[in-house]
Amino acid sequence: MKNIFLSFKHHDDFGELTSDYYRAARLYDFLTEHQFNVFFSAKSVVASGDSDYTALINKALDQADVLILVASCYNNCTSCWVKYEWQNYFQEVMSGKTHGLFLSYIDGNVNDYPREIRSREAVSWSDPNAEETILEMICNHLGKKEEIQQISDKTTRRAKGSSYGYEIGDEKNRLKVQARLESRYDDSILSEIISKRRKDPFYILDVGCSSGFLTEVLFKKFEENIRVLGVDKFRECIDDFRTRFSDCDHFYAHQLDLDRPGWEDELHIAMDKIGIPHFDLVFCSMSLHHMADSAAVIKALRDFLCDDGHIYVRTNDDGLKMAYPDPNDLLGTIIRMSEKTDGISDRFHGRKIFSELYNAGYKNISIQHHSVDTAGKTEEERKLIFENVFSWRENYFRQQVYEMTKANKTDSLISSMKAYERIVDAVKKVEKYFKDPTFYFCFFITTAIAQK
Ligand SMILES: C[S@@+](CC[C@H](N)C(=O)[O-])C[C@H]1O[C@@H](n2cnc3c(N)ncnc32)[C@H](O)[C@@H]1O
């Protein structure tokens, strides 16, 4: 197993953990999951039980195949121990004593850092794929071909959007649970907009409509006055949508993948066929965060709206969840593992939606967060909240195991199986929490409404 040394400033002058520490801790988790032996002093020193800190650091430096300096600023990377670690390693690399790799992972402008750092490869904290970039550099240096392929597969998958499956697990039922828990927020806002409409018919585009369960809940009551076009990337969704609305004249469905180039032209053709000139409302419920570039889709959708037409988005963010008691931070484990899993939707889309709408040129943007919690709920109701937030996550990990088996990649298969076992275990334990009436869980749904 290859050794990686993380060099970072642990505490600030007030004894508080630094942001460098948190970055390094995330990188430690990430690299450990990729089967590296990582020296992260915050854990490794305690684990070794050795009290001779200098000897321990020197030994780890001698064994390191890679050293990564993690720093938020000049002062932190030149503080006593940090400087000792990386400068020592750097000099040995430069003198040819070691064939190790020296990398820095830094915040801000590289020109604000010491010359040695400026002269070598540096990854920025602002790079959304920083961890994968670092992994790729390490694998390149160590000649690990299989891992490099895996990283490029992962990047390709991300470019394609999430690997969400309508037919996977109990998804059809979960969508009904989700609609039951969350749609009342859509209902109050949308009913008001539709009721105040100035003309009939009122045209609605339902992006990622699935089988139309939610579409029916929200819009069927307005049937005479509206025309709804549901679009979804899955043929099965479109078939189920058409079956659901087979006795309604004003609900149409068209298979459309908004991750595929040219979807705009295809949508125009579908609209022309039905006779829809534009949309008065674009409705996106829990669909944008599955797309590879939600910001680009939001921008392109604006062109399909009439002047002053509305876009309504419901999305979520794993940062808006809390659990108590949760002594082993299982919620944190599940969230961190989910975030790093290939093919999963954007788990932090809620915080981005305002910027995406603003940058796309929408006006009158209003964002709201609505809470759903376990307080005063029956065991059955608490179970539904659990299912809505947790039950589906293991599907993505199972899919990874399946893909690695198919690709016959032994190392990756072992790590994806381990990850699958860990998530199943954590989710099962959390499921037990929900049976306890004293346990409290709360999550927030994010909704956004804006106008062209
Ligand atoms: C979680 S479901 C939400 C369904 C429904 N809107 C609701 O809120 O109940 C997400 C839906 O978005 C669809 N979807 C995901 N990516 C898509 C894409 N690139 N183009 C079209 N539909 C997509 C999925 O197929 C799925 O039906």
Image: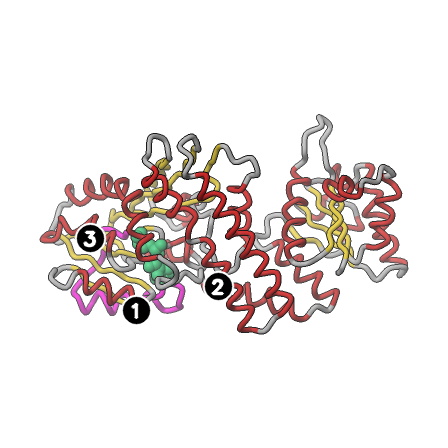
Indicate which disc residue 216 carries.
3
Where is residue 63? Give x, y as percent: 83, 55
Left or right, residue 168 beside residue 176: right
Q: Of 420 and 304, which appears nearest the observer?
A: 420
Residue range in magenta is: 256-283
Callouts 2 and 1 close, C-beta under 8 Å: no
Q: Any magenta on residue 291? A: no
Q: How far apart are marks 2 and 3 (CA)?
A: 31 Å
Secondary structure, mark 3, is: helix
Which residue is identified by label 1?
235
Query: Crowding at label 3, few (<14), some or many (≥20) Cα neighbours within 10 Å?
Result: some
Position above or below: 95 against 318: below
Indicate which disc residue 254 carries.
none
Lower position in the chain sequence, tag 2 or tag 3: 3
Direction left: furthest residue: 224
Left or right, residue 183 beside residue 150: left
Indicate which disc residue 399 carries.
2
Kindly identify the residue that appears in the image at 61 percent across and 60 percent down: 415
Callouts 2 and 3 close, C-beta under 8 Å: no
Query: Amino acid type of disc 3?
Result: Glu
Q: Is residue 227 visible?
A: yes
Label 2 vs label 3, nearer the camera: 2
Q: Distance between the residues labelled 3 and 1?
A: 19 Å
Where is residue 40? Give x, y as percent: 73, 45
Lower position in the chain sequence, tag 3 or tag 1: 3
Query: Amino acid type of disc 2?
Result: Gln
Q: Of 309 and 166, which appears nearest the observer?
A: 166
Kindly identify the residue that appears in the image at 41 percent across and 60 percent down: 164
